[in-house]
Amino acid sequence: MSVLFRCTGALLSAVLLCGIQAGFASADFVVTDVQARLDRRELHVSTRIRLTLSEQAELAVENGVPLVVLTEFVLVRDGILWNETLFEHSIRQQLRFHGLADRYVVEDLNGGRIDTYDSVNDALKSMGVFRSQVFTMSAEVNPESPEYTLQVRSLLDINRLPAALRPLAFFSPSWRLSSGWTKWQVTNR
Amino acid sequence: MASNKSVVRFLFGPVPAVIISLLLLFTLFLLTSAAQHSKLSGEFYSVLLGVNILGILTLGILIAVNLLRLYRQLRAKVLGSRLTLRLVAMFVLLVVAPITVVYHFSVQFLSKGVDSWFDVKIDKAVDDALLLGATTLEAIKQEGVERLVEGARRLETVSNRFEVTPLLNELSDESGYIELSLYTQEGRFIASSYQAEQFLIPSMPGERLLSQIGRGREYVGLEPISGGNQQLRIAVPVRSPGLGAPDRVLQALQLLPSRYAALADSVESVSAQYKQMIFIRGPLKFSLILTLTLVALVATLLAVWAAIFISRRMTAPLRDLAEGTRAVAAGDYGKELPVNSTDELGVLVRSFNEMTKQINKAQSRVRTSQKEAENQRTYLETVLGHLSSGVMSFDTAHSLRTSNSAVTQILGIEFESGLSADRIREEHPNLEPLFSVIEGSMTQQLNEWQSEVTVFGPRGRQVLILRGTKLTGRGGYVVVFDDITDLIQAQRDAAWGEVARRLAHEIKNPLTPIQLSAERIRRKYLGLLGGEDRATLDRATRTIVQQVQSMEEMVNAFSSYAQPVRMEMNEINLNQLVKDVSELYKRDDHVIGFRFDLENDLPAIAADARGLRQVLNNLLINAQDALANTTDPVIVLSTRSVQSATNNYIELTVQDNGPGIPGDLLGKLFEPYVTTKEKGTGLGLAIVKRVVEEHGGAIWVESQPGEGAKTTVRLPVSNLRANGTADIRLTTARAAGEQA
């Protein structure tokens, strides 16, 4: 039984330690601006998200660990009792460091586009900017209805981390980077 | 409530625990796979981890609840709980100890194993490979720079935009650039040449590039592009042809030759992976130890739960057996235990069930026998209860064991079982004659005996004939007695009737011819004789006639005594009766003094007034006769009421101060024809005794020679019959009294 207690204690200590570390981290993802416009079946979105990595995450990138940032867009129509989801779209971007080129590489995992940057800040800045993204929806929205909301969230995808890093990331808030869902009013045309 | 209990029992039973265990094992397998780079389970790593922790917590709660139940059972001293605890402790010890050892060595092995993966030599080799790749690329970069510098010189002379673009196309064609662009020093686009459509939008130079060009230096950088290819971004300054005109920036994007690109990609990939591995060495240890800990924890919890479950299963038959034994000890022989196994415990339980079944059958037989015995006892009690004879049984300690209702009817007392004969004698002195005989016979241990005793019971004087028998087997005695008072009276009546009949027939009948013959002789020969003969004849015939008349009167009186007389029973004030009768015997000369000691408030009794008057007359006549030669003769008459535990009665005493009665006569004073007087029939006291006995009373005489005599008459208070009459056989008081 003492082994069980020791292991449980070690686990709790690790969680506590990670929590303390997270307390000192200033890392955060913040959705600063979203402009969204509906045009029949098309959703035009321009987004600016401030992505700031924690010290641990940045160190991981520099040591060859690729990070995947997931940005999600959900268009909902406001209802009385519940909201109706009309459209969902996710964009995955991978940030990694290319040692031979001494550059930070941002790869759009949806489209395959690759951009390189001199610094991690440039890379993160680029990753947080979506200019004039046009999403095509399956159904046309009612142009007369004004009650449309775009929910935007950006987070670090822990499940895409190397397997060995996931348990620590699971328990450590410094790896649980997320902007949380932010809501933005959508204009028609 | 029952359904809730069954739900709770199900929730904390084996099924949920087994399901949770299987789920845990499966998720642990997935978790382990995720730790080994399984892409599928890696997507749900967090979920798997959460499910595992939740499952462990649930399993822990199940175990805690089971242990709590076990603790409560221990506190309540439930059968089998101690054994269950011991088995659980033993199983847990057997399982936890090896798991602990394995866990400890596994943690050590993992830590050291992971550290051993990383070697300084490998680290150096990777760095060297990266350096080698960079060096190789440097030559290609230098060649590219030189070629682009040459192109920049050609552009220095061209400032017109329309001339620049063809020149860029020419240079691009010559060198095989995928994009060749001209920018201002601030990075504004001037002109471009591209080979592929995807490069319609020029790749703008970065700040670092412009900064380096601004400092008058060339820029060369390797960049990965899509499709696994790599390109070189080369930039050089383009001097302005005119004085004061700003310099420009020529940027070329050149694909790295595929052979070099593959090698560079390989070196970069290996280097990146190795650095990544070094970086995640700590988390990797944490991950592996975490997984190992979870596995060990699950294994331990499963072992503990299995230990509890198996212990309960093992002790359940023993607990049932213990409860069954308790039930049998408490007299419940119908308890049957469930047989859930075919092993030795199952055989034991079956044997127990067979044993209880046999005991139950035997018990049923015993109950049947007891019932039969009870029926027989009831039958016997019923028979005894309806017997007219009193039946008492005594144990070996001479204590009363049983008595039937006839005992109460005859003796007027309901005895409690367990009373000793001595105690009964003490509590009921009137029954002294009866129980002294019984006690004496039992003390002598006579096998069979028979006796006749007289007691004063609720109906007055009672003559009892009793027979005793020593019981075999359990020991003790049984005594059967009958009240033969009425029988003796009837026999005596019959005897006296027969005597009277015979007297009438044998004596009285010849008396008339004797008297007639004497009178005839007198009449015929008295006149014929004279002198002495005449006087003799006259005296003889007169004597004959007188004696015959006397005999006739005596026979008549005796016949009357023997004949039944119907008497009327009325309430009598005995004190008043005593005063009335005694007045007849007070003479004017006051030779005999009378003293009265009569109790006030004497209760009335039911009696025949004429009969009691006769009794008083006879007793006073006897006292008067006894005082004939006594100086200062005194007759004392007294009455008093006496109360005993069972009877209320009145005592009348007639006491004189005469010479008393000889001792040899005291015992037969009340028998007919016993008298000390010269004259009289000798029936007076016999008649008195009969009258008293017919009233249910008793009479006795106490006397010491020279000290007078004291006659006591005891009469019961409540002997009035329902119809107010009683059949008594009594001669007329006067006739008998006159003859006494």
Image (spheres, rainbow, N blue to C red):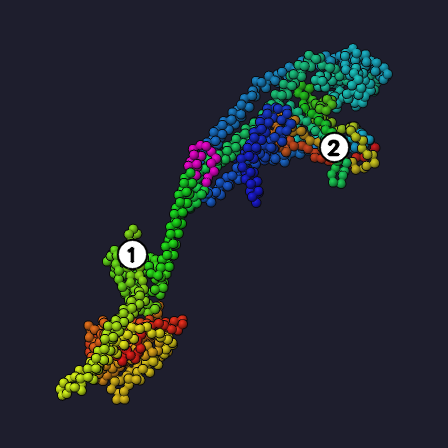
| Residue B566 placement: quadrant | bottom left
| Residue B457 placement: quadrant | bottom left
- The front one of B182 and A88 is A88
Q: Position of residue A32 (x, y in %)?
A: 74, 34
Does residue B649 lie above or below B470 as drawn? below
Return the chain for callout 2.
A
Q: Position of residue A103 (x, y in %)?
A: 69, 22
The answer to whether residue B479 is magenta is no
Provide the residue designation for mark 1.
B477
Provide the residue designation for mark 2.
A74
Kind of residue indicated by mark 2: Val
Is disc 2 surrounded by few (<14), some (14 to 19) or many (20+) residues within 10 Å?
some
Left or right of A170? Residue B593 is: left
Left or right of B497? Residue A47 is: right
Left or right of A189? Residue B513 is: left
Q: In the image, which residues are magenta?
A: B336-353
In this view, the residue farthest toward the left is B532
The residue at 71%/31% (across/down) is A154
| Residue B607 placement: quadrant | bottom left
Q: Nearer the viewer, mark 1 or mark 2?
A: 1
- State how far apart marks 1 and 2 are (Cα): 112 Å
The residue at 31%/59% (across/down) is B480
Kind of residue indicated by mark 1: Tyr
In this view, the residue farthest toward the top is B174
Does residue A135 lie above or below B609 as drawn? above
